[in-house]
Amino acid sequence: MASELEIGDSRVEFMADYVLKTLKIKPDKWTKMYSLDENKQIFMDFFEKPELTTLVIIATTAGGLVVQYEWPTNPKAKACYFVRRSREGIQKDTVLRNALLYGDLSTSPLDQLSAFVDEVLVPLLSNDRNHDKWPKVVSQDVTRHVHNLKSNVYVVSGQAKGKTLLPLPVGADRVEEAGDGEKCVILFFTCFIVISYNVQPHYVIRSTFRKISVITNVTW
């Protein structure tokens, strides 16, 4: 797809191909963005200056593209990012798949983080086969931190949406198939999660009474 644009630089063609496929936009949008000299210079500086570690290409609500070095703080549309793996210049013959980390950013970073934790991090670090050579204490500690992270991300995602979400312990859905040892671990995390349930309702109630106090000038 990007080869049709006649860019003349394999590095830019690589990025263009990924952006066009990921953001599902027409090639003329890229051509319009890249035709500006200041945008071309941004790409060249990114390739040649090792101190520039990140390049972000954002799809605007108007249908255009914006390229910048900074991560978007409040994205209104999807974006693609490219991060260099090392502090070395990126030449035209560089294999970009090895030189760059790249991916896409959604308009809801918390949802994206939640999906990453649920679908990648938790299955990866909760799988006993991935740390069968670790000491038991280390394995249990890593598992505990992973479960805490999953719960915290779930709670924060709910708070960002104005909802009070109470997380379930990881593994609660397969407790019937679990062995005796795994059941003990699941039971431990279940107790820990249930105890933490007291925090959110208490916070919501306290916040509500504070708002009432401000409105009515009554101290609770």
Image (cartoon, grey):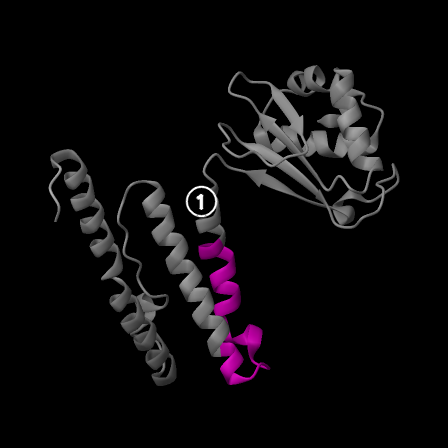
Q: Quadrant of the N terminus?
A: top right
- Left-right relation of 7 to 211: right
In the figure, 73 relative to 200: above or below? above
Q: Residue at x 84, y 46 (%)?
A: 88
Pick whichever, 65 or 179, lies toward us.
65
Q: Quadrant of residue 131?
A: bottom right
Q: Can residue 129 be seen by looking at this rendering?
A: yes
| Classed neighbour count for the residue bearing mark 1: other residues with Cα under 10 Å, few (<14), some (14–19), many (≥20) | some
Q: Amino acid at mark 1?
A: Leu
Give the image quarter of residue 110: top left
Location of mark 1 (residue): 110
Tally of numbered discs: 1
Relative to 34, is 90 on the left or the right? right
> Quick one: SS at disc 1?
helix
Give the x, y percent position of residue 137.
50, 83
37 vs 75, left or right, is right
11 vs 4: above or below: below
**Residue 178 horizontal/vertical position (percent):** 35, 77
| Residue at 62% in and 31% down | 21
Q: Nearer the viewer, residue 198 or 212?
A: 212
> Residue 187 location in percent, x, y?
30, 76
Q: Which residues are magenta?
A: 117-139
Quick check: 90 above or below 30? below
Q: Is residue 160 magenta?
A: no
Q: Residue at x 67, y 29 (%)?
A: 68
124 magenta-colored: yes
Main SS category, magenta section:
helix
> Which sits in the foreground, 74 or 33?
74
The picture places residue 70, in percent across and down from the top left corner, at 64, 35
The answer to whether residue 177 shows anywhere in this view is: no
* Residue plotted at (55% across, 84% down): 135
The image shows residue 4, relative to residue 89, as above or below, that is above
